[in-house]
Image: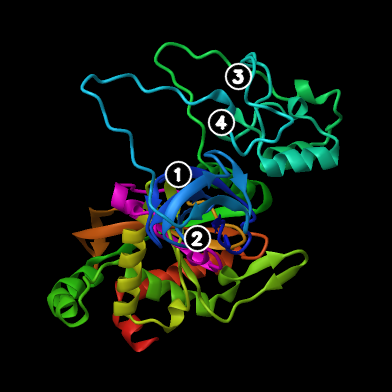
């Protein structure tokens, strides 16, 4: 018998939720075949079979919160049990006994018996049950959980315990009852990724003294250079030359000149970084993720374009790894690909700066005393005013603008 274990989840990730089982108990599985998907607050992790055989048991059902090293199920050597021969007349499937529906549930909350009334607490996961027992808390006090079908998770218990008024007697009234839905409405549970995005964005607004400064960039020089060399670039490097590599290089140059924008605050100290780990915001099926282009200050245009293209493909397929989503020191987000003309990006804590790119739009501009139609882009730098002064932020944006409008500066590193 081989145990199916939760793999290491990466830096700062202590738990995951079982999102979807790809195999059922009794089904055959090959070694390294995907078995189950785990959803963390950063990315979806696919767990493969550690050995070939048959899925003997599933120990953690969908919606259950699990930690690194926890047992998800077991595999035994052998072939899957043959399915019974079908008769000529189709019959309705026989429902599984209620007592076997939740093999992972603690005995204190047996699945058999009367169906609980709408206000009753549903069974909780093993981690949540253990924590409640240690803390003297009951599921009824915690209330409706964030797990599947409202089950209480370990995160729900921790959130309950962190409330200022976590007294057992007063807790049931802490959560207001969900309002009744009107016709045409439906209630869908937020994924862990979406909950984390919402929480981190709110934390950024609550903790950082966030301010945004704007400028506009004439994209004519970059567009001309790109059009002139795009075919030769793709032929030599096997990747298309895009605009993002120019902005990454321009930001690297500006960050070297204004290191506070690349730093972070920790307590009463400022941590300056002698490297640039550039976060590149990309859209995935579950929401926005920010894979990190490590040591971007040491990469050339072709390496940057290849890495960004790879990030985009794997983000769409849900194949990004956890360690690729941590450790960024500055972020670039491009709302222009969706048609955004101007926005104020929100910081990605603990970073102190984020650049927002936008749509390229032809606009009349005064050039050499004459009005010309130029391809212009608004750019926005949101920064933490606790560490970055207004002068530094504006100067950073001007330095980046100058590099984009004269890309020869990027080639010569001046």
Q: Nearer the viewer, mark 1 or mark 4?
A: 4
Q: Between label 4 and label 3, give the one nearer the viewer.
A: 4
Q: Position of residue 23 (x, y in %)?
A: 41, 45
Give the secondary structure at mark 4: helix
**What residue is shown with label 2?**
354
How far apart, in angstroms, are the residues tagged by discs 1 and 3? 29 Å
Kindly identify which numbered label has been placed on residue 178.
3
Element type where label 2 sits in the image: strand
Q: Note whether 215 is above or below 80 in the view shown.
A: below
| The magenta segment | 316-343
Image vertical order of residue 7 relative to residue 407, above or below: above
Q: Which residue is mark 4?
A: 100
Count of numbered badges drawn on the protein: 4
Visual colour scheme = rainbow
Please state, as top left, top right, bottom left or bottom right, where the N terminus lies in the image: bottom right
Q: Looking at the image, do the residues carrying marks 1 and 4 touch, with CB atoms under 8 Å apart?
A: no
Q: Is residue 93 above or below residue 367?
A: above
User: In this view of the protein, which residue sits in the foreground, 271 or 11?
Assistant: 11
Please tell me which of labels 2 and 1 falls first in the chain. Answer: 1
CA separation in Å, label 2 and label 3: 36 Å
Quadrant of the rendering where the C terminus is positioned: bottom left
Please tell me in which quadrant of the rendered image residue 106 appears: top right
Question: Is 326 within the magenta?
Answer: yes
Percent x, y for residue 269? 75, 70
Q: Residue at x 60, y 52 (%)?
A: 71
Residue 46 appears anywhere in the view: yes
Residue 320, image quadrant: bottom left
Q: Please say whether residue 344 is visible from this viewpoint.
A: no
Say few, some or many: other residues with alpha carbon within 10 Å of mark 2 (under 14 / 14 to 19 / 20 or more): many
Q: Are marks 2 and 3 in contact (CB under 8 Å)?
A: no
Q: Which residue is mark 1?
A: 21
């Amino acid at each position: 018998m081989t145990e199916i274990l939760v793999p290491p989840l990466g830096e700062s990730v202590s738990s995951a939720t079982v999102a979807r089982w790809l195999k059922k108990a009794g089904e055959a599985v090959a070694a390294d075949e995907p078995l189950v998907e785990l959803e963390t607050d950063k990315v979806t992790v696919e767990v493969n079979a550690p050995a070939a055989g048959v899925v003997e048991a599933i120990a953690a059902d969908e919606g259950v919160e699990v930690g690194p090293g926890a047992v998800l199920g077991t595999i035994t050597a052998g072939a899957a049990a043959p399915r019974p021969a079908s008769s000529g007349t189709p019959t309705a499937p026989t429902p599984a006994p209620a007592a076997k529906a939740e093999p992972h549930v603690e005995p204190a909350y047996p699945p058999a018996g009367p169906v609980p009334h709408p206000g009753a607490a549903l069974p909780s996961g093993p981690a949540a049950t253990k924590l409640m027992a240690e803390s003297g808390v009951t599921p009824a006090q915690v209330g409706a959980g964030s797990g599947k079908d409202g089950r209480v998770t370990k995160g729900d218990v921790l959130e309950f315990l962190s409330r200022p008024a976590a007294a057992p007697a007063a807790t049931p009234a802490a959560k207001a009852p969900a309002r009744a839905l009107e016709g045409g409405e439906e209630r869908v549970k937020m994924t862990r990724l979406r909950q984390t995005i919402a929480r981190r964005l709110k934390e950024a607004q609550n903790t950082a003294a966030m301010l945004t400064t704007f400028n506009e960039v004439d994209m004519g020089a970059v567009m001309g250079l790109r059009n002139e060399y795009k075919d030769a670039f793709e032929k030599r490097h096997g990747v298309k030359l895009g605009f993002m590599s120019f902005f990454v290089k321009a930001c690297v140059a500006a960050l070297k000149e204004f290191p506070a924008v690349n730093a972070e605050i920790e307590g009463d100290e400022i941590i300056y970084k002698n490297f640039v780990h550039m976060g590149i915001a990309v859209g995935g099926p579950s929401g926005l993720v920010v894979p990190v282009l490590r040591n971007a200050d040491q990469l050339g245009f072709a390496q940057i374009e290849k890495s960004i293209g790879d990030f985009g493909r794997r983000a769409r397929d849900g194949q990004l790894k956890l360690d690729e989503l941590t450790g960024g020191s500055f972020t670039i987000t491009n709302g222009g690909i969706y048609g955004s003309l101007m926005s104020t990006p929100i910081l990605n804590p603990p970073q102190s700066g984020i650049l927002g790119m936008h749509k390229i739009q032809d606009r009349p501009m005064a050039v050499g005393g004459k009005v010309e139609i130029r391809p212009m882009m608004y750019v926005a730098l949101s920064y933490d005013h606790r560490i970055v002064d207004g002068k530094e932020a504006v100067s950073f944006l001007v330095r980046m603008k100058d590099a984009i409008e004269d890309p020869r500066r990027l080639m010569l590193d001046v």
